[in-house]
Image (cartoon, rainbow, N blue to C red):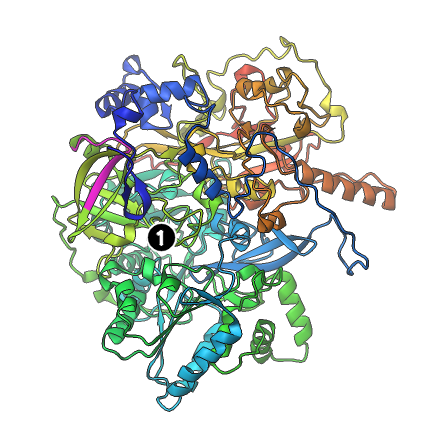
Amino acid sequence: MTNEKHNGGLIQIKTREDVCPSKALDLKTVREKIDAATAHDQREKTGPQYWRSLEELAGSQEFQEALHREFPNGASEWLDIVSRRGFLKVMGASLGLAGMTGCVKLPLEPIVPYVRQPEGVIPGRPMYYATAVTLGGYANPVLVESHLGRPTKIEGNDLHPASMGGTDIFTQAAILGLYDPDRSQSVMSLGDQHSYAGFLSAIRGPLAAQKPLQGAGIRILTTTISSPTLAEQMRNLLKVYPQAKWHVYEPVNRDNALEGAKMAFGQPVETRYDFSKADVIVSLDADFLYGGFPGNTKYIRDFAKRRDPDSGNMNRLYVIESTPSATGAKADHRLGLPASEIEQFAHKMMSILETGDEQKIQVDLVSHRGASIVLAGDHQPPVVHALAHALNAQYGNVGKTVFYTDPVDANPVNQTESLKELVADINAGKVDLLIILGGNPVYDAPADLNFGDVLKSNKVPLRVHYGLYNDETAELCHWHVNGTHELESWGDARAYDGTVSIIQPLIAPLYNAKSPLEFVAMLAGQADASGYDLVRAYWQKQHSGGDFEQFWRKSLHDGWIEGTAFQPKSVTAKASATAAETKTADSNAIELNIRRDPTIYDGQFSNNGWLQELPKPLNKLTWDNVIQIGPKMAERMQIVSKDILELELNGKKIQGAAWIQAGHPDNSVSITLGYGRTRAGRVGTGQGFNAYELRTSANPWIASGVQIRKTGGWYELASTQGMQSMETPNGDTRPLVRETSLEKYKKNPQFAHEEEPEIPRDVTLYPDYHYEKEPYAWGMEIDLNKCVGCNNCIVACQSENNIAVVGHEQTLLGRHMHWIRVDVYYEGDRDNPRAFFQPVPCMQCENAPCEVVCPVAATSHSTEGLNDMVYNRCVGTRYCQNNCPYKVRRFNFLLFSDWDTQQYKMMRNPDVSVRSRGVMEKCTYCVQRINERRIDVETQSVRESKDIRIGDELQTACQQSCPAEAIIFGNLNDPNSKVSKLKVQARNYSLLGELNTRPRTTYLAEVKNPNPELKS
Ligand code: SF4
């Protein structure tokens, strides 16, 4: 089979045998090996206990090849012209081919000093501003680092009560979104560029014509809005045009949660949780420990604080889920169930049970009355949410760990119904002027609404699209008005708890765009209103007292407005809510789960290279979505990973590559949204397949009766799961992840050091160095118990250190550039394995194997214990990479960094060099941050004539972004530093410590807290 295009860009690459003559994954072997590895009788036990992929477990030739050579066959050359073109596309706008002919010349550009330096700006010293970026309407509070007026890095706002300093991957990647050269740069009309003034004169007439009709022909479609200012503007606009209608839709919405609340309480309340007080947590398909779940950064922090096995109050997490998730991986007990059976499970939990696993969970909940949480995932139907509310009431959690508040959404309608109503009005010829304010419904509306065809039918005489991209929806509108990014506009938004953040711009709009506030003001007749005036005026009205200026400055400074968090509401549960009959699903029908994508979300981040190349938490896939299928079902249907499958549902068909996911429930498959875009931009267009084609308004998340066929084609997926393996090629297993149960830990706190060989510290060729004589000895501790695999550290590191994106083809060759990776290991039954996350940056070994083999001393040791990299010495022999047992060194095989695109130049951290072709790079413990802080304390020391040292306030980028506080960095020579205190814990162990590399980064072993009454 030759290359062929399929829905949204999936390319069938010949047959498996043509491309990969090695042995394919053999599920029978996998099962036998797992049986052997997990045998109860120790004498029968063979094979690895912990494994990263089913390929590894099966010992496939593909995996063995990768193990023998870190970069598999073909990695050394770049002969495929198609791959080369694909790579250039990924790098953004510049196709100048600078340096592509072999010899790289660095750009020479004049630098210009300030003639008059603005007050408060010190060249070389960044400023930080508090603001927020939103996702699904919810504000994520942030601090943005700005260098001479250029925002370069996002950090969490540790003063904000709803964030406590953490962020998620989407927030971290917002910087790349700001500078995306594919953002819409001008007003467009029918394919031609226009001015904003031209648009104003075009819309003035139609708006005036609606005045006598009271706006009966106007429809405004927005995404979820939590901005108090924008919500008031919309309400005022509806006063001017009382017959106009405001519709709301976004594909990843909270319809089910709000309908569940209405079912339970008769009103659409928002549910808030306090995980710091929860001893027992039961998740009904809720991935609350991952980005995209409202409040996740605060929830992760509170959850992780309760994972300390020495605290005496470790929490316990039960996860019942339909698609394997990062939250499921952290569970103390995980049960995989088809999505439709979770309702039955919740009903069972409501009844009085005498036996069974559910009864044991009930006992656990009863014994932690008032200190537990039951929560449901947004894709579960309303009845499951109502059941979760009832269970929280039953176990006394309301008012203690579970709170109800007003909704954060300013217009909390059922969004799917709202869009249906809009489509009905358009089809009925009732709409004269349609304004789409953000969102991309032509791409992401339910397939049965045929939103694209509805627009094409020309039943709406004037269609206007406002947004960041000239996307699929903009293409079908008469006018497209380019919008501002949140980092370049004024606004406000509510966090999950209702706290309002003022959104302040870090930079003037790059493309002369209008903000949503300015656009809606224009519709109301105030074409010249500025976003700043609008937000200020709104809060001036809200603020009583004469100290507005002080209030305003404090709110801007802190990043939030005091007293705006919603107060808990008292609501009464209706007994009838949970009496609803449990639906009996057709047990033979195969179920289809449609989920938001862990890295691309609903498609709004498709053109973000950082997120496209970010390995997904459990399968480490990049650049594609897949059809996830459980091992049992795959074996029955003779399907192997990478086979192209056809899914058919209600007469609609899509094709995608299969991925056998350990732990996926039988008789169901999962696909994710966000791929198969046709107008995403140069990075996102054509990646993966479009799952929206199977999504209907009746069954947006769970559909029954999907048919699966093998097409005979095969598609190469770029998963980093088998890459950078630290196992030995001869099959010996190494104790990489170390874990035990709380019960066993109490009996044997030294468990992490069992079977650890005696390390001959003195038998070494490395010279001994007395680091204790230096003021600083830098080190890091990573707590495996706290890490939830959210991937935030990877994106934060990429942003801080100007790390390049390499594209799908180069990732396939193992050339991705991330300086920190988050490995996932599985253990046990392939159908329900336990999983463990392990972040791996450079270990900064004291006896560094990389240093002794470098012929030009490009990598060498600092007196403070850093394994430094001198880029301009590196001649690219890669000996160091070959000698690194941790596989953390990354080599620029090609000119991966885009040197020409103007926007990317503005984005880069000026304190970190941008690496060129032929250079090795790796984690430096953010040496630029260390040095900046060193200058500060040394200056202060001189000024105050005393010896001041750097303390725990210095944070690496990965540490700062980690919502779980799983990464702690600091000075090992200070016995009172946080890191020193962690290093002396019994759980502390060195990864591959038996090699006597003396790594400065070490780990706290994982301790799970299973219910002793439950077997698994
Ligand atoms: S260490 Fe990284 S992956 Fe783990 S919780 Fe922290 S940020 Fe997330």
The image shows residue 120 at horizontal and vertical percentages of 76, 58
The answer to whether residue 837 is seen in the rendering is no
The answer to whether residue 195 is seen in the rendering is yes
Q: In this view, does 81 lie above or below 298?
A: above
Q: Residues within 10 Å of mark 1 (few under 14, many from 20)?
A: some
421 left or right of 740 in image: left
Outermost residue on the bottom side: it is 212
The image shows residue 407 at horizontal and vertical percentages of 40, 67
Between 240 and 179, the one nearer to me in the picture: 179
252 left or right of 839 in image: left
The residue carrying mark 1 is 678
What's drawn in magenta, residue-wise? 637-647
895 left or right of 640 in image: right
The image shows residue 776 at horizontal and vertical percentages of 72, 31
In the rendered image, which quarter is residue 637 located in?
Answer: top left
Q: In this view, does 989 lie above or below 430?
A: above
Is 948 magenta? The answer is no
Q: Is mark 1 on a helix, strand or loop?
A: loop
In the rendered image, which quarter is residue 667 located in?
Answer: top left
Q: In this view, does 798 lie above or below 506?
A: above
Between 190 and 855, the one nearer to me in the picture: 190
Residue drawn at 28 percent across, 50 percent down: 691
Indicate the quadrant containing the C terminus: top left, top right, bottom left or bottom right: top left
Is 644 magenta? The answer is yes
Indicate the quadrant containing the N terminus: top left, top right, bottom left or bottom right: top left
Amino acid type of the residue that numbered disc 1 sits on in the rendered structure: Thr
Residue drawn at 37 percent across, 52 percent down: 373
Residue drawn at 34 percent across, 43 percent down: 625
Q: Is mark 1 within 8 Å of ligand 1?
A: no
Residue drawn at 38 percent across, 28 percent down: 52
